[in-house]
Amino acid sequence: MTFTYYFWYTISKILAWGLFSFRVLHRERLIEEGPVILASNHQSYFDPPLVGICSRRAVYYLARKTLLNVPLLGPLLPEINVIPVDRDGNDMSALKKIIRLIREGNGVVLFPEGTRSLDGNLQRGKGGIGLIIAKTRAPVQPMRIFGSYEAFPKGSGKIALTPISVVVGEPIRFTNEELDPKTHGGDERALYQYLSDRVMEAIAGLESSESQPHALPSAP
């Protein structure tokens, strides 16, 4: 970790534990060396640092490019391993950087749903994470956050000091057959969506002592 990353990593831990009684369940399952995709549900702006502080090593994040223009925050983001991405189009430069970082043995935080949930329930994952899985063949660490929606939901200007926990699932290691487009009729898009759906199913299966998992919406 760089000094800047370690500083904000430590501050995030202190705030999470002090304000939200933060807990990590099954932390021993975390892959702490080598390439890994940390895949989590997405309920709040709090989610990226909450996933990040579960790991004992520095990990990388995605954030929309417009955040670089925010005073004070913008210049800090590259120092804490944030990769800017243009959400208005296919940002191939950001995608290539993510794939390169994973292949180099790093951990990258991804949210399969793509954006924060409006109601706190799990949404169907998008194919983007499937593409990254297929290109890197990295193991996927499913993780599920409980309580961040209640603490700071999308569209709210208020923060509630409610307990937050993260449950770490067993890593998913996809087989060569599963990663072969031929298994999906040669359709790469179908392959990417299949991989994303598998990850979201694993996330949906995680539960904390306070909460029960919600069912995923059926595919359209």
Image: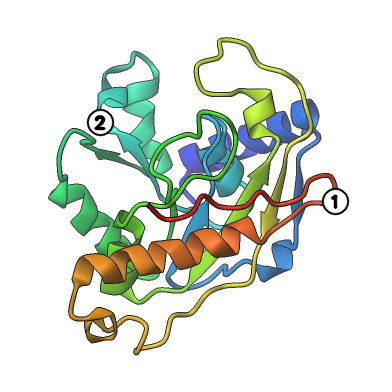
The kind of residue tagged 1 is: Ser
Going by the image, does 186 lie left or right of 120? left
What amino acid is at disc 2? Lys
Residue drawn at point x = 33 percent, y = 24 percent: 74
Residue 209: assigned label = 1
Check contact, mark 1 vs mark 2: CB within 8 A.
no
Q: Mark 1 Cα within 10 Å, few/some/many (few <14, many 20+)?
A: few
Note whether residue 75 is visible.
yes
Residue 86 image offset from top left, x and y in percent: 20, 36
Coordinates of residue 100 in the picture (x, y in percent): 25, 64
Residue 63, x across and y down, in percent: 35, 36
In the rendered view, does 37 fall on the left or right side of 6?
A: left
Q: Position of residue 13 (x, y in %)?
A: 68, 38
The image's colour scheme reads: rainbow
Q: Relative to 139, does residue 200 appear above or below in the rendering? A: above
In the image, what residue occupies the spot 37% across and 33% down?
A: 77
Residue ID for mark 2: 65
Which residue lies at the image location 43% right of the left edge and 80% below the top edge? 174
Quadrant assignment, res 75: top left
